[in-house]
Image (cartoon, rainbow, N blue to C red):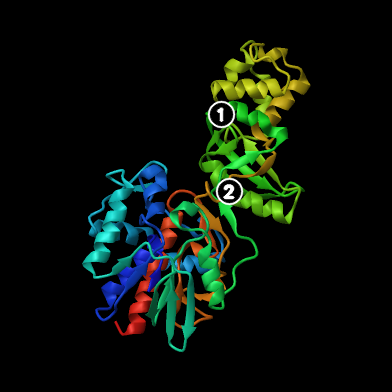
Amino acid sequence: MIVGAGAAGSMSAIWAARLSSDARIVIVDGAKTLGAKILVAGGGRCNVTHEKVLPKDYAGGSRNTIKKMLKAWTASDTIAFFEELGVELKCEDTGKMFPVTDSSKTVLKALLNECDRLGVEIVHPWRVMSIVKYDDEFIVCSNDETLAANRVVIATGGMALPKSGSDGAGYRLVKSLGHSVTERIEPALVPMVVASGSKWITELSGIAARVSIEVRTGTGKLIVRFSNDLLCTHFGMSGPAALDVSRWYFDAKFDDPKAKLVVNWVGDGSFDAWDTKLQEIGKQSVGGYLRLVIPDRLGRMLCSRCGIDPASAGHAMTREQRRALAHMLVECEIEIAGNRGFTHAEVTAGGVPLDEVDVSTMRSRVCEGLWIVGEILDVDGRIGGFNFQWAWANGYIAGKSIASSIGG
């Protein structure tokens, strides 16, 4: 029995069924509509994977462990697998890979059709309330029905997008079977809400810029840096850059209350380099010069923050104004009050520690006959198809292991 019909769960079922003709495989899922996360991913297009997937694209478990798992099922394997299912993928300039149909329904339909072809039973809505191990058998209970299985896969997801069914129930189930979960279970790839000191960001709602965004310790040491598009919103910041950096920022803030989030609005360049550039503007207006490198509204706002009239000539700036503007351009600290929670998060940070699972098989080291896959594990990737690649890899490894345990 596989608990959860999402990416990792369906992949586990497909490979267990492909490699074992003797298995009866049942997927149970509490949702009325299957594959909700697949359907909404990538703006409804489903970012299936990324052209280049590396351990550094993930947080949580150890990179050496993640490397082994990603090597077992690569992005090339994902591309070939979906091509076999009739889903051709295309690579966009960002490295993200989508179905050529630009529809996530194509991906979900292919997975469900393959399950059907292989004889995998899918029962839904069937919400698992408890799992109890008796000798070599698991008793799996919903509100009004009980099923028995000699092998169970937990693929419930984490807590992101709770409307999809990933409401954290999986953590209760794995704990009941002897596993632990990390102390912190937090939203990741989540929009961030600015604090009162940075409310000016909300006045730029709708503005997007290609930026470099960093998390630094209270002493100024760099923790992580991402370069991507940042979207200013009515609540704060969203877009790929903000989502990627979110889990790192909140992790750092938990350990170091003085940790900082710093944005380089022009994407690159040092304070000294931009201080020199601003000295060379001459008669050109400051706003006109900035318009060449950042959105006009953003340039005007940064000028206003530094007490500069954007219509004034560059040479009219005082030394203090010029240096303040250079600082705002490349080292703009943004105060963060919090995030928009699991409802708006794309993935969960935290979960079952990887050392409680044999990552060569995805089998539990704690409970015989149990496999754990997907987002419920303490690994989360950055935006761009990395979390789906993690799910496909987990599912393949688990399915292969299940089939081997049955006898192939």
Q: Which residue is mark 1?
A: 205
User: Measured along the vertical axis of the image, is residue 232 above or below residue 5?
Assistant: above
Question: Nearer the observer, disc 1 or disc 2?
Answer: 2
Q: Nearer the viewer, residue 73 or 160?
A: 160
Q: Residue furthest bottom?
A: 135
Residue projecting furthest to the front: 144
Q: Disc 2 marks which residue?
A: 341
Q: Residue at position x 58%, y 48% from top?
A: 341
Q: CA distance from mark 1 to mark 2?
A: 20 Å
**What residue sits 53% from the left and 61% below the top?**
168
Q: Is 151 located above or below residue 312 in the figure?
A: below
Which of 260/284 is in front? Answer: 260
Residue 369 visible in rendering: yes
What element does badge 1 sit on? loop
Is residue 361 something that shows in the picture? no
- Rendering coords of residue 170 (x, y %): 50, 66
Q: Position of residue 267 (x, y in %)?
A: 57, 35
Please tell me whether residue 390 is drawn above or below residue 344 in the rendered image: below
Report which quarter residue 73 is drawn in. Answer: bottom left
Residue type at the position of mark 2: Gly
Q: Which mark, residue 265?
A: none
